[in-house]
Image (cartoon, rainbow, N blue to C red):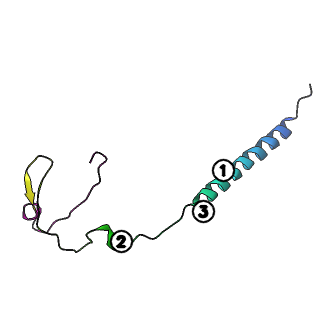
Amino acid sequence: MKSLPLEKITRVTTILTIGSLLFALNSFNSMAAAQSKTGVDIDSLGPQVGDAVPRFELSDQNGNLQSLDSILGPNGGMLLFHRSADW
C-alpha cells in the first residue's frame, strides 16, 4: 500500500475544512433568511412609559397587601412586569 505525501494530506485536509466551514455558513445564512422579521406594535404591549397607573391593592410575595401609594417612593416608582414559568 502506497502512502500519500504529507503535503497532499495537508492540502486535502485544508480543502475539507474550508468546505465544511462554507457549508456551515451557507446553512446558517439559509436559516436566518427563512425567519421572517415582522414589526412589533409597541402600543399593543400594555402600559407605556409615562402612562398613569390605576389605583390597585394586591398581595405581595409575603402575602402583605400593597397599594400604589405604599410602593411609591419620594421620586415616584417603577413597575416591572416579570413573566414567570410557574404562573
| Residue 19 position within the rendered picture, expressed as x and y whole percent measured from the top left | 74, 49
Residue 79 left/right relative to 15: left
10 Å neighbourhood of mark 1: few (<14), some, or many (≥20)?
Answer: few
Q: Secondary structure at mark 3?
A: helix
10 Å neighbourhood of mark 3: few (<14), some, or many (≥20)?
Answer: few
Q: Secondary structure at mark 1?
A: helix
Tell me the magenta residue range. Answer: 68-87
What residue lies at 7% left-to-right and 65% top-to-bottom?
A: 69
- Furthest residue toward top: 1
Query: Quick one: quadrant of the N terminus?
Result: top right
| Residue 75 position within the rendered picture, expressed as x and y whole percent measured from the top left | 13, 69
Whether the residues at callouts 3 and 1 have beta carbons within 8 Å, the answer is no
| Residue type for callout 1 | Ala
Mark 3 sits on what residue? Answer: 33
| Residue 67 position within the rendered picture, expressed as x and y whole percent measured from the top left | 9, 61
Residue 13 left/right relative to 69: right
Q: Secondary structure at mark 2?
A: helix
What residue lies at 9% left-to-right and 57% top-to-bottom?
A: 66
Does 28 appear in magenta? Answer: no
Q: CA distance from mark 2 to mark 1?
A: 35 Å
Mark 2 or mark 1: whose residue is earlier in sequence: 1
10 Å neighbourhood of mark 2: few (<14), some, or many (≥20)?
Answer: few
| Residue 17 position within the rendered picture, expressed as x and y whole percent measured from the top left | 73, 45
Whether the residues at callouts 2 and 3 have beta carbons within 8 Å, the answer is no
What residue lies at 89% left-to-right and 29% top-to-bottom?
A: 3
Q: Is residue 19 above or below residue 36?
A: above
Mark 1 sits on what residue? Answer: 24
Mark 2 sits on what residue? Answer: 42
| Residue type for callout 2 | Ile
